[in-house]
Image (tube, helix red, strand yellow):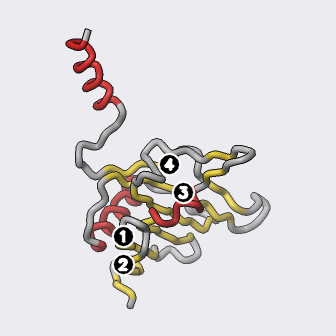
Amino acid sequence: MSVFFIPLSLIGCTESGESNGETKVFEIADTEEIVGRKSEEVLTLRKHYMILNPPRGLTDLKDLVEGYAKDHPVESEGRFLHLSFYRESGDLPRDWRPDEGYMNTDRLEHHKSDLIASITWSDAQPEKEYDVYGKSEEGKILKRMRFVEDRLVR
């Protein structure tokens, strides 16, 4: 019996989506937000992503989210876009989902300590602005860098 248990548990580990130390980016399910009414000229679209094993260097982190946004374009016509990127943590695991329970809510705004990068732009202002953060394990910002496209803003 235990002979079969070990291989089954190993198979379970690989099927659970573990990243094996590789950097992976994916959209967090059930978190897309559209703010505004379709009758309004500009809507705000907020999308949220998880980065497994993010790079430690802030320039490398900026390059990662920039490349991801280019490889996974978001329709921006008539929209202000805000893409947020979070690291995995004990409070924000890779399979996290929002919880709107009656007595207990768990929303992404409760996980700002795990926010490590963001991109904002609109079709009216197409230059993308990137904010990347180096944070402690507790979520304290240790270093922040802001870019407008490839220009570092001081």
Q: Residue at x 47, y 66 (%)?
A: 113
Q: Are marks 1 and 2 in contact (CB under 8 Å)?
A: yes
The Cα atoms of the two marked residues, 3 and 1, are separated by 24 Å
Sequence-wise first label, 2 or 3: 3
The Cα atoms of the two marked residues, 2 and 3, are separated by 25 Å
2 and 50: which is toward the camera: 2
Crowd rating for badge 4 (residues with CA inside 10 Å; few <14, some 14–19, many 20+):
many
Question: How far across and how far down the image is residue 11, in percent?
Answer: 27, 24
Question: How far across and how far down the image is residue 64, in percent?
Answer: 31, 62
- Residue bearing mark 4: 28
Judged by depth in the image, the label closer to the viewer, 2 or 3, is 2
The Cα atoms of the two marked residues, 4 and 1, are separated by 22 Å
Where disc 3 sits, the SS reads strand
**Three-letter residue code for mark 4:** Ile
Residue 14's quadrant in the figure? top left
Is 13 situated left or right of 81 in this image?
left
Q: Is residue 43 above or below residue 9?
A: below
Crowd rating for badge 3 (residues with CA inside 10 Å; few <14, some 14–19, many 20+):
many
- Residue bearing mark 3: 47
28 and 98: which is toward the camera: 98
